[in-house]
Amino acid sequence: MWLQVDPRSPTPVYQQIVDGIKAAVAAGWLQPGDRLPSVRDLAVSLAINHNTVAKAYQELERSRVIEVVRGRGTFVAQPGQRPPPDVAERMDKLRDSLRLAWIEAYHLGLEEAEFERMFWQAREDARGGERKEET
Amino acid sequence: MWLQVDPRSPTPVYQQIVDGIKAAVAAGWLQPGDRLPSVRDLAVSLAINHNTVAKAYQELERSRVIEVVRGRGTFVAQPGQRPPPDVAERMDKLRDSLRLAWIEAYHLGLEEAEFERMFWQAREDARGGERKEET
Amino acid sequence: MWLQVDPRSPTPVYQQIVDGIKAAVAAGWLQPGDRLPSVRDLAVSLAINHNTVAKAYQELERSRVIEVVRGRGTFVAQPGQRPPPDVAERMDKLRDSLRLAWIEAYHLGLEEAEFERMFWQAREDARGGERKEET
Amino acid sequence: MWLQVDPRSPTPVYQQIVDGIKAAVAAGWLQPGDRLPSVRDLAVSLAINHNTVAKAYQELERSRVIEVVRGRGTFVAQPGQRPPPDVAERMDKLRDSLRLAWIEAYHLGLEEAEFERMFWQAREDARGGERKEET
DNA sequence: GTGGTCTAGACCACG
DNA sequence: GTGGTCTAGACCACA
């Protein structure tokens, strides 16, 4: 299974699904047009409630990562089609997460060079990295 | 006031205080040894309950950002004294936040160069930047 | 009830809960995977406020004694999964508590042999012992 | 100085003084009949409030570790003179501290043999150990 | 005066 | 239903 979920993590399960699918798309494991498992199938696979999967899919559709075609299923969206409605807001959040990361790096005593290395390493992890158990 | 808080934000108020003070320390607005406002004073300034501030201060003490001197007040800690007990975990979280940022950048259609610029800009925002309203 | 609490004790109520549950786990009355009473149920049983129980549970989770599964409940953790982040500090505290115990034994005029007996007796009390009223 | 105090420690300052003097007596650095510094002198030496020292001395007198002779000063008590009024209670506390230590050892994953070694090592620390900086 | 704890009762996100 | 957060107001130990 290319998606796993940890019910004991502090990040909500539905958010883990969102993150996981976004990661799969960004890494190329899921290609535009690929079909995603149905809400109920995925719920069974992950042994979670189907409401949770549904919430994740809704979130992904709002972000234009997937497309729901009624009666046919849900698919990975074509990139760069219509931009999602909340780009500006998401950009701000992204900027803020980087700012917080710099602050945390400071408090962890990281050198700027080390942190930069971590930044580029994260790019590798995001792009090509195999998903294994990440406790 | 160098600290503001939005009770309607999804991130808990006590967490906003933690983030805000960490930011102030990282930016140098608060120097090691500086005294922080008392729990109750800050609560009044922010128009919130003192328990919320207390929780934030306790969290900050666990992270070794501040030091509580009983009966006298709380102060910005000297850096690099004793390392916080949970460095390893916080490093992992930091790595993960960067990974998620890369993924989000991908889905927002950011070029690598743009995202890198954003990364370095965030460094400026974290270090010296003036604080404005941040929704 | 396998847990009791004395609101008049100098040690905080939430700490008594922490100690009590750690004791129950160490003695084997609570097995890994066992479900703990919900925050609110335990609060009612102990006739205290639910916030107090919540604080105790959070502390126990930080120590990796229990695991919180969102929306489902809290459970006794599997031992030796991830080690708690503050082992080193807790080791130091443990060492110190033993040192202080030796000093106190001296001032109480205990013979070394007597104190050693007390040490091993404490092991019995910790492992299997029945709980009685402990002022 | 054979006594040091850390105002940032979670254990109250007056308690640190009590522990420190008990330790000095148990280790033999202070002999029965030795004179202790006056409340005010010790307060100056430790750079703390004299009320705090006074509280510690009162506590030590109740435990029969020191004797206050009006107009002459305070001295280390002769051992085994009159027993302190609360032996039973202190014994119970001692037993309890050992029990809690066993429980903590369990949760830290210590082997019984390791913990026993720590127990005997603590005896050395209590008896002969040189006092250095103990952050 | 300081921080720490507790209660009573409310609201929220999550599953 | 679960735990998490917040408020309002109280009391306590410590310095």
Image: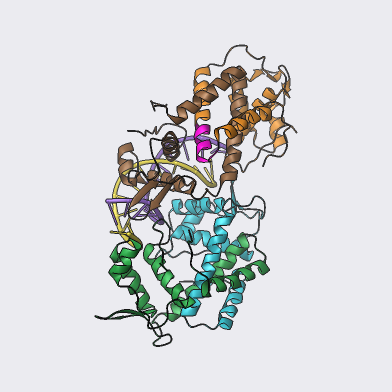
Chain colours: A orange, B brown, C cyan, D green, E purple, F yellow
Spot occupied by residue B24 in the image (x, y as percentages of width and height): 41, 35
**Quarter of the rendering occupied by the N terminus of chain A:** top right
Q: State whether the magenta stretch is mostly helix, strand or loop.
A: helix
**Quarter of the rendering occupied by the C terminus of chain A:** top right
Residue A109 falls inside the magenta stretch: yes
**Which residue reaches farthest left?**
D71
Relative to the observer, which residue lies in front, D90 or A43?
A: D90
Spot occupied by residue C17 in the image (x, y as percentages of width and height): 50, 60
Residue C24 figure quarter: bottom right
Spot occupied by residue D50 in the image (x, y as percentages of width and height): 29, 65
**Left or right: E14, with B61 as reference point:** right
Residue C91 figure quarter: bottom right
Q: Is residue A14 visible?
A: no
Give the residues drawn in magenta, as a range: A100-110
Spot occupied by residue C131 in the image (x, y as percentages of width and height): 55, 71
**Left or right: A114, with A3 as reference point:** left
**Which residue reaches farthest bottom?**
D81
Q: Is residue D103 above or below residue B99?
A: below
Residue A76 falls inside the magenta stretch: no
Relative to the observer, which residue lies in front, D86 or C43?
A: D86
Query: How many callouts does the rendering have?
Result: 0
**Which residue reaches farthest top?**
A81
Relative to the observer, which residue lies in front, A18 or E13?
A: A18
Residue C115 figure quarter: bottom right
**Left or right: D116, with C7 as reference point:** right
Relative to the observer, which residue lies in front, B78 or A36?
A: B78
Q: Which residue is pictured at 59% across the width and 11% down the height?
A: A82
Q: Is residue A60 visible?
A: yes
Q: Is residue A19 above or below residue C95?
A: above
**Which residue reaches farthest right?**
A1
